[in-house]
Amino acid sequence: MTLRMLFIGGNGTISAAVSRLAVQRGIDLTLLNRGTSAPVEGTERLVGDAGDSESVRAAVAGREFDVVVNFRSFLPAQVEADVDIFTGAVGQYVYISSASAYQKPVARLPITESTPLRNPYWEYSRNKIASEDVLVAAYRSQGFPATIVRPSHTYDERSIPFDGGWTIVDRMRRGKPVVVPGDGTSLWTLTHHDDFARAFVELLGNPQAIGDTFHITSDEVLTWNDIARTLARAAGVEAQLVHVASETMAAALPSWGPGLLGDKSHSVIFDNSKIKAIAPGWRATIPFWRGAQQIIEWYDADAARRTVDAELDATLDGLAGR
């Protein structure tokens, strides 16, 4: 039987890879988004705004789906609205949370799905935790068929892993120092979106996943020094690293602060036993050195993609002591 699925979103870093794979698997896929991006071939499109519950309600009125996945939900009020909209009209509702919701600082590694959720540094993560709480309560009280998935740092060819985007690679190629938080030895996990998608689709329509929570990450563990040097080599240069305390970087770059202090400055290693048990044979197969090559090739293919933030560049010079 062909599964009928609705993805709210469908064109983002994670969701685009999942959408393509779902179509390849023969899923009858509908995407609900604002209609401002190119459609995904082989899908139906509904126009609606994920941030406006009445817009979502109007777009799906009268429809039922085997699976609904919301890639664009960030606040508990959005989840509460989805529970109301889809109760009785969906066989499984999948919520995309975040591994940044896990306890910071982490008391014990590796991180498992039972690691406590607490992030006093980042409001984004606290909203994800509150959203999960809504779904857990709905499942327990009324059997709402929720599955929670926590991605960690998942990337595609457009996603330079450092805040600052192409400005960081431009600095590398000009021989300017890359500012790395702390001493650069904290451990981090980068997951290619195609690897994520292959595991994720095994949860869709799977009754064993209902009422449960999973994270999906690569097993490759890198230091931030490793990440910078790997990206630089892909760009054809050697990285010149300067290490700056995370708190100092957060003060100089306030927009970076919550994600840095609430996530990236902490070592994370994930135990993926749970997703591997429900998706037998799956493992992440794309190492970051290959992903870094894809990133550089994508940016080098079009000069319009290679934009440099002069103000950020100057701030980084100041942090690097130049």
Image (spheres, rainbow, N blue to C red):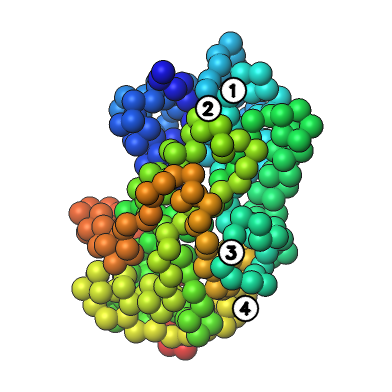
Outermost bottom residue: 321
**Which type of secondary structure does the marked residue at label 3 adopt?**
loop
Specify which label sits upstream in the sequence, 2 or 3. 2
Specify which label sits upstream in the sequence, 3 or 1. 1
Disc 2, disc 1: CB below 8 Å? yes
Specify which label sits upstream in the sequence, 2 or 1. 2
Look at label 4 and name its amino acid. Answer: Glu
In space, the residues marked 2 and 1 are separated at their CA atoms by: 6 Å
Q: Identify the image quadrant of the C terminus.
A: bottom left
Q: Mark 4 points at which residue?
A: 247
Please state the horizontal and vertical placement of residue 146, each as a whole percent of the image: 63, 35
Specify which label sits upstream in the sequence, 4 or 3. 3
Q: Identify the residue at horizontal 50%, vertical 85% (top origin).
A: 183
What mark, if any, has residue 67 been given in the picture?
A: 2
Q: Name the residue under label 3.
A: 111
**Which type of secondary structure does the marked residue at label 4 adopt?**
helix
Specify which label sits upstream in the sequence, 4 or 1. 1
**Which type of secondary structure does the marked residue at label 2 adopt?**
strand
Mark 4, other Cα within 10 Å: few <14 / some 14–19 / many ≥20: some
Look at label 3 and name its amino acid. Answer: Ile
What mark, if any, has residue 90 been given in the picture?
A: 1
Q: Which of 301 and 134 is in front in this view?
A: 134
Look at label 2 and name its amino acid. Answer: Val
In space, the residues marked 3 and 1 are separated at their CA atoms by: 31 Å
